[in-house]
Amino acid sequence: MHASRLLACLLAVHGTAACGGLGGEPPLRPPAVKGHDGKPRYVTQHGGYKAVYDPWGRLERIEHDSNGDGKPDRILRHDGAKQPHRVEIDADFDGRIDRWEDFTPEGALRRWAMADDGRPRLWTVLASDGSTSRYEYDRDGDGRIERAEIVVGGRIGRVELDTDRDGKVDRWQDWDGGTLRTESLDTDADGRPDRRLSYGPKGMITGVERLSP
């Protein structure tokens, strides 16, 4: 179910408490639970749906337990926004997330990843028309992309690498028909390429060029 429909269901059920109570009494505050940061979270629940609000009353997430095992198999993370920016899915009901989906503020799917040893290590990024625009690799699971493959004309046309894993790209590769043509390097760690290597058809370096700052 879409996030907006989940929220509408919850508000419909708890609308009396949210809109002023009964007989002019002040609205009832939802039950509070302690979050991981030690601050209270306010919870409204109906059936398998649960909405969690932060200490300031902003929607933090919606959880859905579709099979009644007491564990959410779908989590929509709003963090105060109208639309969820991420959806986490436990497709096989084993208590572990199998798929992650990230969304734009307008609600369009931006990228998705399947679990690899419990983490999202390969993200498929989508263009506005829904086609694949790039692949992003986070092999060590630290949340930072160390390799990105950009799709051009249905094939990998460019690769960006963070070889020292400091969160910044330091190598840029241009590919043509599955063959590496050029590679630009950032040798002084300023975030800009300062050397360019050219490659022949057999992968041998055919030229080295110094780039202007």
Image (tube, rainbow, N blue to C red):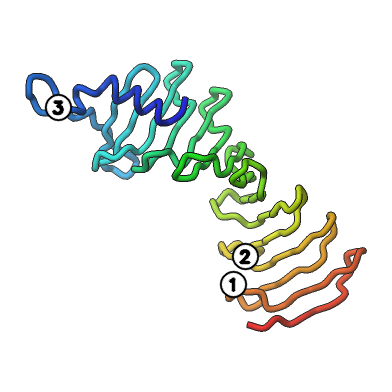
**Label 1: which residue?**
191
Kind of residue at disc 2? Val
**Label 2: which residue?**
169
Few, some or many C-alpha atoms within 10 Å of disc 1 (few <14, some 14-19, many ≥20)?
A: few
Instruction: Answer with mark 1 or mark 3, whichever residue precedes in sequence.
Output: 3
Few, some or many C-alpha atoms within 10 Å of disc 3 (few <14, some 14-19, many ≥20)?
A: few
Measured as percent of width and height from the top left, residue 169 is found at 62, 65
Q: Secondary structure at mark 3?
A: loop
Q: Is residue 79 left or right of residue 87?
A: left
Q: Quadrant of residue 130?
A: top right
Instruction: Answer with mark 3 or mark 2, whichever residue precedes in sequence.
Output: 3
**Label 3: which residue?**
20
The span from disc 1 to disc 3 (Cα, nearest Å) is: 55 Å
Residue at the spot 22% in from the left edge and 28% down from the top edge: 30
Kind of residue at disc 3? Gly
- CB atoms at circles 1 and 2 under 8 Å apart? yes
Measured as percent of width and height from the top left, residue 16 is found at 20, 22
Residue at the spot 58% in from the left edge and 32% down from the top edge: 98
